[in-house]
Amino acid sequence: MPAAARNDRDQDNLRNAAAQGQVVPLNRLIADVRSRAPYNSMTYLGGPQFDAGRMIYALKFMDGSQVVVVYVDARTGRIVGRKP
């Protein structure tokens, strides 16, 4: 299956899961992470990436001159990792 079709299917599945309350809506996940220290002092860069297999969002922030990627569980809204 072409990547574009797979991405469309992932987005449809994610939309359906959000509608059924199985995942936290993306805008709420972003707002929650942005409200927490230390991310509240960083600039959110947008363009979230989604790993449908793991149900994890990767949110990018700028901390000074360094990009920080925060990994958030789409089902719970819990931060599950960050790099660096």
Image: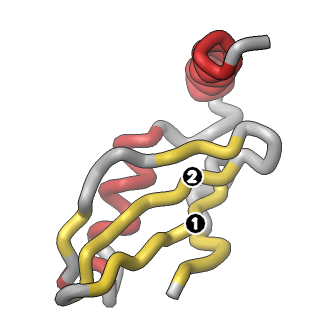
Q: Nearer the viewer, residue 57 or 18?
A: 57
Quadrant in the picture for residue 27: top left
Q: Residue furthest front?
A: 2
Q: Which residue is mark 2?
A: 57
State the residue at coordinates (18%, 84%): 41
Quadrant in the picture for residue 26: top left
Percent position (x, y) of residue 25?
48, 37
Question: Relative to residue 22, is residue 2 depicted above or below?
Answer: above
Label 1: how many Cα within 10 Å (few below 14, some 14–19, many 20+): many
Question: Relative to residue 29, is residue 9 depicted above or below?
Answer: above
Q: Is residue 46 left or right of residue 76?
A: left
Visible in this render: residue 60?
yes
State the residue at coordinates (25%, 75%): 62
Question: In the rendered structure, which amino acid carries the disc numbered 2?
Answer: Tyr
Marks 2/1: CA distance?
A: 6 Å
Percent position (x, y) of residue 79?
58, 71
Q: Which residue is mark 1?
A: 71
State the residue at coordinates (62%, 48%): 74
SS at mark 1 in the image:
strand
**Mark 2 touches mark 1? (CB < 8 Å):** yes
Visible in this render: residue 20?
no
Q: Is residue 41 left or right of residue 11?
A: left
Question: In the rendered structure, which amino acid carries the disc numbered 1?
Answer: Tyr
Quadrant in the picture for residue 44: bottom left
Q: Nearer the viewer, residue 41 or 7?
A: 7
Percent position (x, y) of residue 22?
70, 34
Label 2: how many Cα within 10 Å (few below 14, some 14–19, many 20+): many
SS at mark 2 in the image:
strand
